[in-house]
Amino acid sequence: MDIKNKIAIVTGGASGLGADTVRALAAKGAKVAVLDLNLDLAKTIANEVGGLAVKVDVADGESVEAALATVKAELGTARIVMNVAGIGIGRKITNKKGPHPLDSFLRVVNVNLTGTFDVCRLASTDMIALDTLNEDGERGVFVNVASIFGYDGPVGNTAYAASKAGVIGMTLPMARDLAPYGIRVMTICPGVFDTPLAKAETGEEGFNRLIANVPFPKRGGNPKEFAKLACHIVENTMMNGECIRIDAGMRMGLMI
């Protein structure tokens, strides 16, 4: 799919991987809606690229419906949807102080997994009504974001790993569901990327320990590298129903 003049949605688009994805799509000529819980930050990125900022809590069904309705009214129906919004929590399932709080587990799953599914189910329903774009009958594409933790999560990441494994697991069946309509579904599984959120969650020392496990290049990923892959997926119609690790060959050990 040619990105130029297409309408794109990026959840979690106000910072980190999402913000650079917004910039990359806009640089290729897309009209981008920046969806984020932080509306002020979303407006900053949207103003930078001439896009639209919309507040959303992806864990809230009514908020998702309202946000997508706003994008449709202001820009039109999106053909490109990038689900980048996500949160994490570092906590063992139990310890001497007590069990993992259930509400925090549910919050992580609701944002990372249920939120991704909700955006996909609603946006795809609008997408199937669009005209096809080319001789393949293509209508649109979803690029969801999981994590290498969804394959080999370390200690203290049961909630996050479970939520991202769910995103990985629904990639192929969702692609099969939407194939008759010419809509593709792909998932990106990032490793360690140099973002403010990553460093806030692990701390500088923890981040450096993670980098020590990266084979090559021995550094955190640049969000622009993630965005480049996201755009390539949109442009390459043969990419469908698959999960791509972008992690410099990293495999997680027992500990962070």
Image (cartoon, rainbow, N blue to C red):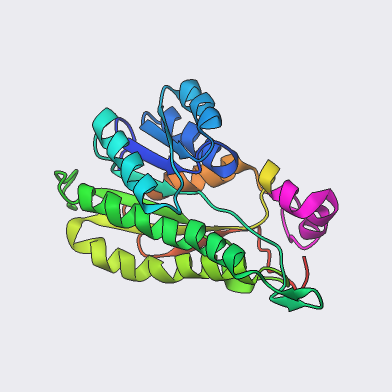
From the viewer's perspective, is residue 74 above or below residue 80?
above
Residue 70 lies left or right of residue 210; in this view the side is left
Residue 228, percent from left and from top: 51, 42
Residue 166 lies left or right of residue 6; in this view the side is right
Pick the front one: 197 or 5: 197
Residue 168, percent from left and from top: 47, 67
Residue at point 78% right, 70% down? Answer: 255
Residue at point 77% right, 65% down? Answer: 256
Q: Which residues are magenta?
A: 198-220
Residue 163, percent from left and from top: 53, 66
Q: Is residue 209 magenta?
A: yes
The answer to whether residue 188 of the structure is visible from this angle is no
Residue 146, percent from left and from top: 52, 60
Chief secondary structure of the magenta portion: helix
Pick the front one: 3 or 120: 120
Say which quarter of the image contains residue 70: top left
Say which quarter of the image contains residue 215: bottom right
